[in-house]
Image: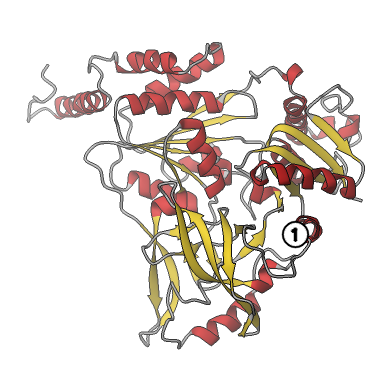
């Protein structure tokens, strides 16, 4: 039957014709034949572009990916889950290469600027933060017509043909509404779904992530990696779970240790469902569990007995390449403490003011007048700054020129105030009282709005040492992990430990907090 022909008086025929047309449209979009061979051809192409010989599990995952790309199910999401070393990166590189070879629309995203940069490096394609992709800013007004706050306005995405969206590091995608001072937005996850499928239910969204990493702040699980949570948001869901570690653990102590922590997390989850088993084990901690053993030879793991010894090595590595090394901590307290000490070693002539060339970590979205913004998690470089601090609204401010990387990867220069008090604080952000005081001070200013120089000031921290949440999505050749707690601990600490150690590409240094 011609897919464009149907009998108007036959409802079943109409429905069949519509479905046939959708299959034809989807297959045509991907440059395949419409007779059911599209998914097979897509699999063969991705297999060829993969650049490696996949095992049976990876082949099955590729077949599922191909079938999903050619599915005629509306509002359908694919979850691709896997721990470190299971091959997620290789598979997504193959998918990206396949879509690029067809010159078809694809949007690569990640929750933070650092994660987007890593995704771009892995795929050879441009990648954006989810916030930059889906949001603009709008003003909120009270009954008197005065600005009462700001909200992230969801952009409407339009395309003449279906688009494939890929969101990496999906474990970081929050499902909770944001209420940050006078800035509000809905949950990032529901907004992402609306952005993708609001313009066309035939768009595709692949959520890629590691279920053993830290969940979003203030959440106990990563909703974007759980099918039931997405189904509750009226999505059809496919899921691929990569279970087998493919990289040879015998040659990687980092991967071997990470796999042991992963297995510990799985063991605990299983025993949560079996109280009798847990009771029989006497609440065994990590050291009593056969899944965890640090006594193995590993050239890429070094245990360091003190923070002083670790900082000496850190300084040496940093001076060779500032982009190659990071210190990861469990708490903001220790991140602040280490940043102070490392700055004294690396910037001996520096006072409390940042030095030209220093890298600062953005901890709150900063809006630019071209409706773009520097996203939370990105780095900026200090170019120059004023010699004195400005006192205003009970806080201290520093006028500075900074450099950042724009959406096209080009270096741009930007002048802004820095919130100096936060830069030198152990706190992660301003408290509610500080926000309210600043808000009241600016409410009637001529510049009041999204780009107000104080409300929109850059909120930054030194980036020599950062927390596990801030490190998530990034990769460094050398990673120092501060062991503030023993190897055991609760599930949250184990997830932090797993997340921190899997940031290391070459060497992992486990540092005692003394």
Element carrying mark 1: loop
User: Which residue is at the far front?
Assistant: 349
Residue at image location 38% in from the left, 21% down from the top: 67
354 in relation to 9, above or below: below
User: Is 99 displayed left or right of 436 in the figure?
Assistant: left
Q: Nearer the viewer, residue 314 or 237?
A: 314
Q: Quadrant of the N terminus?
A: top left
Instruction: Examine the rendering and report whether any part of residue 151 can be seen.
Output: yes
Q: Residues within 10 Å of mark 1 (few under 14, many from 20)?
A: few
Q: Nearer the viewer, residue 299 or 261?
A: 299
User: Is 126 displayed left or right of 364 in the figure?
Assistant: left
Give the percent coordinates (x, y) of residue 265: 74, 34
Q: Quadrant of residue 236?
A: top left
Residue at image location 62% in from the left, 36% down from the top: 211
Q: Which residue is mark 1?
A: 347
Give the percent coordinates (x, y) of residue 128: 44, 46
Give the percent coordinates (x, y) of residue 284: 89, 34
């Amino acid at each position: 039957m011609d897919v464009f022909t149907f009998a108007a008086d036959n409802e079943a025929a109409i429905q069949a014709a519509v479905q046939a047309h959708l299959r034809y449209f989807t297959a045509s979009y991907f440059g395949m034949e419409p007779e059911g061979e599209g998914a097979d051809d897509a699999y063969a192409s991705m297999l060829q572009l993969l650049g490696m010989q996949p095992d049976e599990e990876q082949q099955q995952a590729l077949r599922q990916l191909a079938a999903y790309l050619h599915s005629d199910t509306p509002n359908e999401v694919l979850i691709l889950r896997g721990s470190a070393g299971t091959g997620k990166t290789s598979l997504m590189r193959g998918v990206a290469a396949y879509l690029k070879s067809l010159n078809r629309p694809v949007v690569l995203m990640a929750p933070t600027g650092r994660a987007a940069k890593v995704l771009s490096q892995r795929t050879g394609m441009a990648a954006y933060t989810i916030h930059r992709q889906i949001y603009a800013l709008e003003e909120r007004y009270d009954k008197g017509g005065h600005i009462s706050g700001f909200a992230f306005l969801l952009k409407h995405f339009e395309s003449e043909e279906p688009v494939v969206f890929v969101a990496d590091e999906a474990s970081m995608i929050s499902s909770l509404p944001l209420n940050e001072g006078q800035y509000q937005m809905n949950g990032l996850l529901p907004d992402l779904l609306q952005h993708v499928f609001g313009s066309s239910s035939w768009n595709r969204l692949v959520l890629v992530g590691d279920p053993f990493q830290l969940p979003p702040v203030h959440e106990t699980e990563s909703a974007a990696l759980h099918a039931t949570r997405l189904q509750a948001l009226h999505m059809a869901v496919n899921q691929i779970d990569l279970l087998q570690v493919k990289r040879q653990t015998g040659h990687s102590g980092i991967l071997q240790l990470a796999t042991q922590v992963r297995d510990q997390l799985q063991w605990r989850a299983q025993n949560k469902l079996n109280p009798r088993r847990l009771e029989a084990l006497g609440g065994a901690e990590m050291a009593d569990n056969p899944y965890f053993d640090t006594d193995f030879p590993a050239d890429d793991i070094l245990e360091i007995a003190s923070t002083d010894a670790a900082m000496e090595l850190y300084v040496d590595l940093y001076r060779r390449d500032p982009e190659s090394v990071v210190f990861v901590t469990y708490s903001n307290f220790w991140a602040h403490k280490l940043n102070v000490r490392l700055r004294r070693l690396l910037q001996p002539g520096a006072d409390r003011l940042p030095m030209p060339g220093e890298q600062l970590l953005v901890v709150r979205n900063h809006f630019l007048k071209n409706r773009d913004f520097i996203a939370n998690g990105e780095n900026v470089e200090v170019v120059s700054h004023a010699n004195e601090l400005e006192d205003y609204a009970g806080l201290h401010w520093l006028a500075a020129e900074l450099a950042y990387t724009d959406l096209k990867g080009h270096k741009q220069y930007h002048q802004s105030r820095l919130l100096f008090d936060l830069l030198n604080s152990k706190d992660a952000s301003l408290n509610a009282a500080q926000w309210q005081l600043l808000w009241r001070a600016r409410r009637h200013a001529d510049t009041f709005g999204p780009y107000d120089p104080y409300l929109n000031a850059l909120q930054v921290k030194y980036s020599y040492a950062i927390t596990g949440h801030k490190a998530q999505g990034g990769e460094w050749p050398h990673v120092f992990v501060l062991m503030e707690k023993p190897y055991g601990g609760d599930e949250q600490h184990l997830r932090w430990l797993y997340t921190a150690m899997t940031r290391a590409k070459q060497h992992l240094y486990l540092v005692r907090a003394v």
